[in-house]
Image: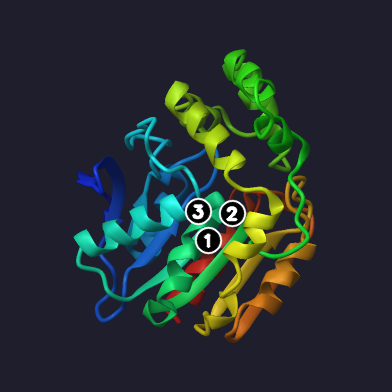
Amino acid sequence: MPVHDKRAEVGGVEVFWREAPSPSGRPPVLYVHGNPTNSDDWVEFLERTGGIAPDLPGFGRSGKPAHFDYSIEGYSKLLEALLAQLGVERYSLVVHDWGSAALGLAQRAPERVERVVLINCVPLVAGYEWHRLARIWRTALAGELFMGVATRGGVKRLLRGGFVEPPSDEFVDRVWNHFDHGTQRAILKLYRSAPPSVLERAGDRLGELRSPALIVWGEDDPYISSEFASRLADALGGDTRLELLPGVRHWPWIDDPRVIDTVAGFLLS
């Protein structure tokens, strides 16, 4: 399916998104990326399933205003406004990493959600403790100093842990080309908005999501243990299929492109 670039003001913020036509009779899929990437993550998925993939404010080609609420609540409201602006009532949801902020939207109106796919996402359940890098970002001054010395080479080294093989130069450039002060500020604010207690409260109503769900998880993820894949499966209220992928890390569809087939097959079944 052809994928088109779109741009509009949504909720007072300029938002860039990618869009492809959905199969006849099917609600669109809302794809939500994490940190530090953008809608580039989802192009191959969109080509298979159609749907909508925004660059979240603070990332990629969307606006990065200082006043935006870079939090689960802020992103949920923005995505709700985007869907309303596009006239989308019912949708499926696919999230990766911090894309789980969109679960805030899903829990507010679970009857609107057709299907859910969670891929190595920030877990909105009890017991998660932030990884070492996130703890630096969450620390005043230390996070700013860390961001202030960022280089392309440094970003590549940081990304390295998320893949079995080193990330391609293309992938690194997709991140680095948008890793400006606005994105760095958004990352710090986002992580500082979410101590573990906030993450737990944000998932209080996951059991009300009773639509079919698929959880795909790279077992060797250095940032989020696969134990949280099982905890999320237990928290969701519908029929949930869990696929743990040994030897796969934080971006499963890059380590194992068959993940794209798995996700597309689930969404289109």
Which label sits on residue 72? Answer: 3
User: Amino acid type of disc 2?
Assistant: Trp
Q: Residue at x 56, y 50 (%)?
A: 98
On the image, the x and y values in percent for residue 106 come to 45, 70
User: In which quarter of the view is residue 46 placed?
Assistant: bottom left
Determine whether label 1 and label 2 are within 8 Å by CB.
Answer: yes
User: In which quarter of the view is residue 120 placed?
Assistant: bottom right
Circle 2 SS class = helix
Q: Which residue is drawn at 66% across and 35% down?
A: 138
| Residue 206 visible from this viewpoint | yes
Circle 1 SS class = helix
- Marked residue nearer the N-terminal end (3 or 1): 3
Q: Is residue 7 left or right of residue 253?
A: left
Mark 2 neighbour class, 10 Å CA radius: few under 14, some 14 to 19, many 20 or more: many
The CA distance from mark 1 to mark 2 is 6 Å
The CA distance from mark 3 to mark 1 is 26 Å
The CA distance from mark 3 to mark 2 is 24 Å
Q: Which of 192 and 63 is in front in this view?
A: 192
User: Amino acid type of disc 1?
Assistant: Ile
Q: Residue at x 63, y 26 (%)?
A: 156
Residue located beneath label 1 in the image: 260
| Residue 166 visible from this viewpoint | no
User: Amino acid type of disc 3?
Assistant: Ile
On the image, the x and y values in percent for residue 236 come to 61, 78
Residue located beneath label 2 in the image: 253
Which mark lies nearer to you, 3 or 1?
A: 3
The vertical placement of 62 against 256, above or below, is above
Q: Is residue 7 left or right of residue 68?
A: left
- Marked residue nearer the N-terminal end (1 or 2): 2
